[in-house]
Image (cartoon, rainbow, N blue to C red):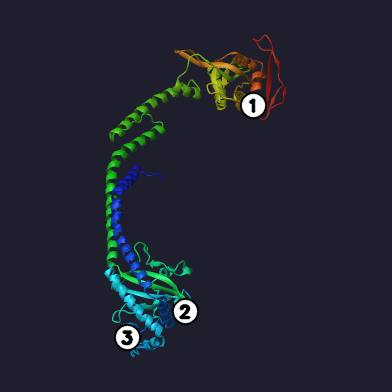
Amino acid sequence: MKLKFRAVLTLSMLGVAGLAAVPAILAEARRPWDELAQLVHTAEGVLASTMAQLPQADREAMTRFARAHLDTGEVDAAGFVELVTPGAVATPTTGKTTASSPWAAALAADPKAAEAFARSWRVLAAAREAAGRAGLNVDDIYLTLDDGIKPGFFQDHLAFVLGAQRADESPIAPGEGYNVTAIDGLFWRASYLPELGGQPGRFGQNPTRDPVLPRFETDEWGSWYSVWLSERVPGGYLALTMDIEASAVRTAMISAAQRSALLLAALVLLAALVARYISGRISRPVAALRDGALAVAAERYDHRVKVQGPLEVAQLIQEFNLMTGKLAERVNLLQTLEKMLSKELAAAAARDGLRLGGEEAECSVLFTDFANFSGTTESMRATEIVGTLNAYFSVLIPIIKRNGGFVDKYIGDAIVAFFGAPIPLADHADRAVRCAVELQRAVRTLNAERRAQGLPVFSMRVGVNSGEVVVGAIGCDEKLEYTSIGETTTLAQRMETACTVGEACIASGTRRALREPLPEGVTLDAEGPVRVKGYADEVLASRLWIDRAPDA
């Protein structure tokens, strides 16, 4: 796709402005992302330290207890936390119970789990405080159990195991269901479930692009970003998760994006204005030059472009006008020459000039002559004779040119042409023979039309010879004629006089130079001796019989 100059210039201006401003824009936009990355890094350190402080036996005891108390309804989470906080756990040694909580009997029946919960709660509470000292605003640090996506509870839910919140906050209880489908939380499970491409033992976090900003869970208490560490436990997967309040980061990201967008919009506007001004200074004269080029293409060589624009462009316009002026002169010369010369020779003369004298060239020379021309025209007026000749020549000359021949001259009713100069032709003999055949066929067709109209007709002879000739502009500055001279030209004329009326005769030089098969319907006699005027000895020649058998 080709762009207009103004579009290219605008893009270039944007590129230059971008090189200067984009790094600063990116740095400004990147700052809140770096802050979030630092929060995640700190959280990962706290999570790793916390997971290391939870004994494997305690983790297995708690997950076993949670799996035994799966519940997607309302549970007495506050009562459970009261039981596992320091001094409230019912054990065989202390004998303490909290009768008001339905968890008392369950914990009393599983003292290992009860002690594991008590120890682990202290670890999580300490981790929560440590995270606060590290600069993290943490809502909770909690353990969840996931047995993988399977029919039943774990189809859409995770099970809470234990959290760090007190009974008077928003505590959680073992087995309490957490509906991850409702929050589109498949990304959470995908970090550690092998069936979703995950791998336990790694850190995970909310998506960093959803679709542009990171995935924040926003409620009336803030915007939360979660980081977790998973591990494999018997029968499932345990994840230690930290919810970080990141409203400031989210707000900074939105503000940075808005500022970047405004700055980019300002850069685009500025670039467009500057490009409009500069392109106006350049595109207008360029458009004028384009119009001038179209005028030249339409052969309006008198068109001139107004000189305008910056210095360099103005100079270009001046050179363009000078060029069109010289081109007009050359075209006028060429048109004049074409009236006297062939188009090829006229082009060569206009380009290189004509050299006086001559040069040797391999050519085929063709002569035509109307039989009994004087007898046919003796009763005709001069104007009728000229009109009749022109009627025939207007048919014959295009055939010669179409086959690559150069019309040398008219000698009364005869035409002299040669093939191979001024443009060299390797197949000059084939072209000359093909031209001779087409000339005779064209005369027969024209004669049939003229007979039907009651007009006089002519029959024609054609002679061809091939060999070395001297061609060139012969004469002086006052009168030049581009022609061929030499024995090859003389013998070509003799072939015409020796020819049968309505056919063609070729000398042995042409026969030897033929490369291609003869045109369809043409028969070539065997070569034989022919006596012609001006030659002491007989010369070898062959007759071409066109669309009829020899001597028919």
Q: Position of residue 137 (x, y in %)?
A: 28, 70
Residue under circle 1?
515
Which residue is at the front of the view, 286 or 84? 84
Q: Amino acid at mark 3?
A: Ala
- Real-space Cα separation, disc 3 to disc 1, in angstroms: 118 Å
> Which one is earlier in the sequence, the residue at label 3 or at label 1?
3
- Real-space Cα separation, disc 1 to disc 2, in angstroms: 93 Å
Q: Position of residue 331 (x, y in %)?
A: 42, 25
* Crowding near the residue tagged with mark 2, few <14, some 14–19, many ≥20 C-alpha atoms within 10 Å: few
Q: Nearer the viewer, mark 1 or mark 2?
A: 2
Q: Nearer the viewer, mark 2 or mark 3?
A: 3
At x 37%, y 84%, the residue is: 75
**Mark 3: secondary structure:** loop
At x 41%, y 31%, the residue is: 299
Q: Amino acid at mark 1?
A: Arg
- Residue 93 occupies which quadrant of the picture? bottom left
At x 58%, y 20%, the residue is: 363
Q: Nearer the viewer, mark 3 or mark 1?
A: 3
Location of residue 188 with respect to 495 vertically, above or below: below
**Mark 1: secondary structure:** loop
Residue under circle 2?
152
- Real-space Cα separation, disc 2 to disc 3, in angstroms: 34 Å
Which residue is at the front of the view, 343 or 42? 42
Which residue is at the front of the view, 283 or 404? 283
Residue under circle 3?
88
Q: Position of residue 73 (x, y in %)?
A: 39, 82
